[in-house]
Amino acid sequence: MKNKKIVIICAHLDDEVFGLGGTIAKLSKDNNIHILTIGNKYKKDSHDDKMMRLKCYIDTCYILNVKSTVFSYNDLTFSKNQSKIEKHISDFLEMENPDIIFTHTPKDIHKDHKCISDIVNVINRRKNIEIIHFSIPGNSERNLGNNTFSPNMYIDITEVYKTKKKLLKIYKQYKDYKYPDPLSTKKIKAKDEYYGSLINTKYAEGFEKVK
């Protein structure tokens, strides 16, 4: 994947790292990447927590060498603001005109993640852009049957895994997820190793490429 305009649409600050941090690190070397994050307000966070989370996001985007845009919606309010968010994302995509969009899987159990996925997929009925779904650890693997996140595409991130570890460490300043939380560094590493084993490499991230 080279010389592409790629847009990554995330619900929250930190989704870009937990969902596909290694892939962004790898693809940013040869592609033009712009991350769009919809929400940056968290009701349970103190003012200092909010500032720390935003700082972590800014630091990760700097390390990844990507452009970023952040909207200011509150978490868990996406559904009631769906029409407004759809308009904002549609205008953003019209301006960016990307070749590829990475966004949340619709199989995610988090309401905000699923809402963004549904919005992007509805918009894309008109735009016909290639869409690739990513998952957030712990939020997309708990559903059963056909509604479980099932990757059909894997990206080898072995060469950039040190960068992914660095990005995860940055977000630990905001919140240090302890093992066995799915967002703990140890669990994420195990998941990346498992996906890597499926394509005979050390580390990989898995995606659902929409056909």
Image: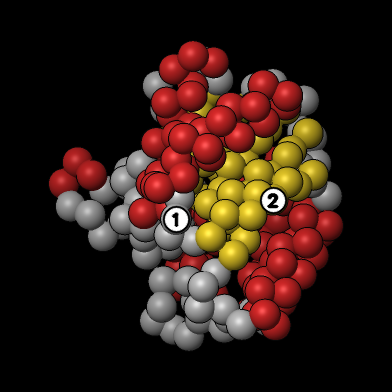
Instruction: Give the label on residue 151, or none.
Output: none
Residue at (66% x, 44% y) in the render: 36
Label 1 to label 2: alpha-carbon separation: 16 Å
Residue at (58% x, 27% y) in the render: 90
Image coordinates of residue 37 in percent, x first then y, are 63, 50
Vertical comparison of 190 with 134: above or below: below
Image coordinates of residue 12 in percent, x first then y, are 56, 57
Front position in the image: 25 or 174:
174
Kind of residue at badge 1: Thr
Determine which residue is flagged by label 1: 77
Vertical comparison of 173 with 182: above or below: below
Kind of residue at badge 2: Val
Q: Is residue 21 left or right of residue 186?
A: right
Residue at (70% x, 82% y) in the render: 48
Whichever of callouts 1 and 2 sits on the residue coming sooner in the sequence is 2
Tag 2 secondary structure: strand
| Closer to viewer: mark 1 or mark 2 | 1
Front position in the image: 20 or 115:
115
Q: Is residue 61 left or right of residue 84?
A: right
Q: Is residue 24 left or right of residue 204?
A: right
